[in-house]
Amino acid sequence: MNDQLDLCLESAREQMQLAIQHLEKSLSKIRAGRANPAILEDVLVEYYGVSTPLKQVSTINVPDARTIRIQPFEKNLINPIEKAIMAANLGFNPSNNGEVIIINVPPLTEERRRDLVKQAKHEGETTKVSIRNARRDAIEEVKKLQKNGLAEDLAKDAEEEIQKFTNEFSAKVDKMLADKEKDIMTI
């Protein structure tokens, strides 16, 4: 019975950790006024009839805070890459010199910054919902175990442990959001 309880607690903690990892990835894609290769992470390029991630057909680097430089592995990919960036609707206008594609990242307006903060907060709230769902599922599992003979004091301790995980991960979300908001609003 204790093995099942330990498994239940570990599963809850794992689900909450996955929610945090998802939030980290989502927040990295929200640009904060500086050039960041993660912005292009979801861009897919048509490569010999197959949708391929941009980073698999080119080298992406950031020579300065306002520029993203994309070096395709094959020169014939320049136009498909430009089209893919435009289709991704990221608000960029790529240009090329026949060798590389250059994206100038425009500075963010105050209104755009506020929108990005809202977007980050939405991602954070979605993560908190995932964390609460993991808590709910774990507590339901503990109650099932209690019906099947788990001691009441062990069940109470497990529920307190689950709540401790929930508080810990919710605090992480709040800190991540505060950091991202500061990052976005800093000019």
Image (cartoon, rainbow, N blue to C red):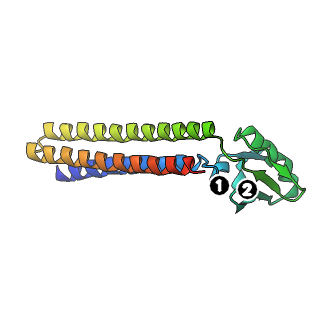
Instruction: Identify which amino acid the numbered label 2 is placed on.
Output: Ile
Circle count: 2
| Front one among 12 and 1 | 12
| Front one among 110 and 37 | 110
Residue 151 spot, x, y in % from top left: 9, 45
Q: Is residue 7 visible?
A: yes
| Label whose residue precedes the other's in the sequence (2 or 1) | 1
| Front one among 89 and 179 | 179
Residue 144 spot, x, y in % from top left: 20, 37
Instruction: Report which residue position mark 2 lands on.
Output: 68
Residue at image coords 66%, 44%: 108
Instruction: Identify which amino acid the numbered label 1 is placed on.
Output: Asn
Instruction: Report which residue position mark 1 lands on.
Output: 36
Q: Residues within 10 Å of mark 2 (few under 14, many from 20)?
A: many
Residue 82 spot, x, y in % from top left: 81, 46
Residue 177 spot, x, y in % from top left: 46, 46
The answer to whether 8 appears left or right of 31 in the picture is left
Residue 140 numbered mark, or none? none
Q: Secondary structure at mark 2?
A: strand
The answer to whether 11 appears left or right of 104 in the picture is left
Q: Residue furthest right?
A: 98
The answer to whether 64 appears left or right of 49 in the picture is left
Label 2 close to label 1 by CB (< 8 Å): yes
Q: Secondary structure at mark 1?
A: loop
Residue at image coords 9%, 46%: 153
Residue at image coords 54%, 38%: 119
Q: Is residue 18 visible?
A: no
The answer to whether 101 appears left or right of 12 in the picture is right
Structural distance between the alpha carbons of marks 2 and 1:
7 Å
Q: Residues within 10 Å of mark 1 (few under 14, many from 20)?
A: many
Residue at image coords 21%, 53%: 3
